[in-house]
Amino acid sequence: MKLTGSKIFVESLRAEGVEVVFGYPGGAVLHLYDEIYRSKSPRHILCRHEQGGVHMADGYAKATGKPGVALVTSGPALTNAITGLATAYMDSIPLVVFSGQVPTHLIGNDAFQEADNLGLTRSCTKHNFLVRDVKDLAYTIKQAFHIATTGRPGPVLVDLPKDVTAATCEFTYPQSIKMKYYNPTMQGHPGQIKKAVAALLEARKPVLYIGGGVINANAAPEMTELAELMGAPVTPTLMGLGGFPGDHPLSLGMLGMHGRYATNMAVNSCDLLVAIGARFDDRVTGKLDEFSMNSKKIHIDIDPTSIRKNVHVEIPIVGDSKVVIQQMLDAMKSGGKFKGHPSKLKPWWNQIREWQDQHPLTYEQGPGDLSAMYVIDKIYEMTRGEAIVATDVGQHQMWTAQMYHFKNPRCNLTSGGLGTMGYGYPAAVGAQTAYPDKLVLAVVGDGGFVMTMQEVITAVENNLNVKACIINNRNLGMVRQWQQYFYDRRYSFIDLSVAPDFVKLAEAFGCVGLRASKAEEVVPVLEKAFSTPRPVIMDFQVAYEENVMPMVPSGAPLSKMLLV
Amino acid sequence: MRRTISVLVENEAGVLSRIANLFSARGYNIDSLSVAETLDASVSCMTIVTHGNDQIIEQITKQLHKLINVIKVTDLTEGDHIEREMVLIKVTTEPATRAEALRVADIFRAKVVDVTPKSFTVEVTGGDKKIDGIIALLRPLGIKEIVRTGRIAIGRGN
Ligand SMILES: Cc1ncc(C[n+]2csc(CCOP(=O)(O)OP(=O)(O)O)c2C)c(N)n1
Ligand SMILES: [Mg+2]
């Protein structure tokens, strides 16, 4: 039987097991929306802005490990979606985003709401497609999901001209796919594995440095086994948080620009640095020529371009983190070479503990202003590190990374690579869509929240009971901090004192608004929020000038960290 | 160092712009680029001449390889290979220098493909040295216009 392109679209999504599409309608996608209207599945969630919709798909994907799907119309809708695509691209999040396009015969004519969707998204997608013939539609969708979810994951855009969604053809969804020239390497090279294991055995001051790749590969269990077998310290990047239990005795917490003193010292002084699914980002390394100068380096990554991009590595291993760690574990366990190994790292641990005692991560909640760190600490205590926490970008994001010891993978939703303000709230909505009964928090700044707060309406409409915690310091805190340190407190356009009353705003949106401005109000407000089965917005009115410490000034080496 | 990289790509709309975009987005240089179909019409061959240190070249080849439409990336510089470029040179000549210009063309085995009373155009094919040589000798005699194909290259033997 012949089906329309729109019907093929819906049937293909079903065949891919897509449960939910985040979208916003418009002229070029009218046929698709008509088909969505008639179909019961997949579920469609109406975002209130396409950027929000793509961030929702991103939060959904991060929380579930399944690809997130979004649908937007042509022109301005696609340009709105670009921030979401670029965010997902930098963080390697699998998305399939469908955009409407003007009919094929009008392409290139500056037609109404026409944009060069492929051109615009080429540099912020893993790949993109324009479907010119309905006969190619099903196969293209299959390819899009395949590319988005395999190898180093990423967003894929499929551009659908209006006439293609109306045209008809026979439909069969391809069962499997084999792309001749696209074959990501999964297995590590056996020779390299051997070399790596020898280096692990030899090292007396190792550090395991893990990134988002560990989470993408679902390698957290293998990661724990590896660390425990060696007795080695583990430090996650911002994206790696939860890839190893944050409360594990072997965890050193995050490294890098706002990493802990002891952690950065350990990275700088180690004799073997094992990077797994991480990419030596400048926020991690500080000044490159002085980064961990005396260590041998092993780098495991599924993307060959990540290896030796900015740091010289002695033992590169291209492959999937989960598979490669398992290969190493198998080699390590045969012959019992690593029996009793942890005791050999005793002196190293003594050194690390000493650094930790010298400069622990602390804050003080005095009688005065409410400390943002206190709020985040209480959030951690009350949820025991088990909630799904989306953050926005800024100081609150770094405090969350420092203080919220994520126990599990896929609970930390944050825009690490692009640093997109406005990401947090919609990402939380996306995760809550996947897990309606789990506790999902959005820890956001008073600046970033306002960038995408229209999505509160989406949460209210769909009974997605996201608990938003606005860390309200009445300024663009992270920018203010830099202006304080490096521009003599010349506070240039960071003040946000003029702002809506967030409690009233919450009520106007149809959700529950709560406020805490004193330390003793924090726990009761959180308790109230967690026990309210509705979307809640909490306004935590915190100190104006609290800073994220320690801090490596940009371009400085890790060793030159500012401590106060 | 200069490198000649041969890239086989799927012959699809937009592939050239993906490659060009990769070079511009990451700040790599393209010294020359030439593209055309291969025996298999669904595959095109691009010859890209670029330069950079070893680390940059390693990144360029890996990044090219990462593009979904790229089939094969070969850095020909390392192995034994042949490089050619074709150039069309239009020379304006005074009566006094005309003979000299024609002699130069002849020495370089360039073919005269167009003649007018005041100018002629030659076609010359060769490697870098030959092309640079003829240009250097014709320049003082009056080159009016020059059009180059960019280099193409092929490995020797199998
Ligand atoms: C879209 C976007 N614009 C600008 C920035 C630059 N920026 C980074 S952090 C920050 C301040 C964020 O302020 P707020 O949301 O209040 O969070 P805080 O730092 O105060 O916790 C800004 C402006 C950004 N990351 N993203
Ligand atoms: Mg703020």
Image (cartoon, grey):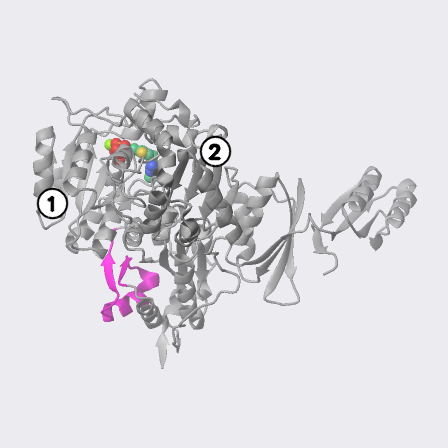
SS label for mark 1: helix
Q: Which mark is residue A295?
A: 2
The numbered mark, 2 or 1, whose residue comes first in the sequence reads: 2
**Residue at the image position 66 percent from the left and 67 percent from the top:** B39
**Residue at the image position 37 percent from the left and 27 percent from the top:** A552
- Subunit that carries the residue with mark 1: A
Q: Which residues are magenta?
A: A19-48
User: Measured from the top left, where is residue A523 in percent x and y?
Assistant: 10, 36
The answer to whether dots 2 and 1 both sit on one chain is: yes
* Image position of A443 (left or right of B4): left
User: Measured from the top left, where is residue A251 in percent x and y?
Assistant: 30, 38
Q: Pointer 1: what residue?
A: A530
SS label for mark 2: loop
For residue A25, say whether it is visible: yes
User: Measured from the top left, where is residue A265 in percent x and y?
Assistant: 38, 28
Please check the rendered image and state whether residue A33 is part of the magenta-colored stretch, yes or no.
Answer: yes
User: What amino acid does circle 1 point to?
Assistant: Phe
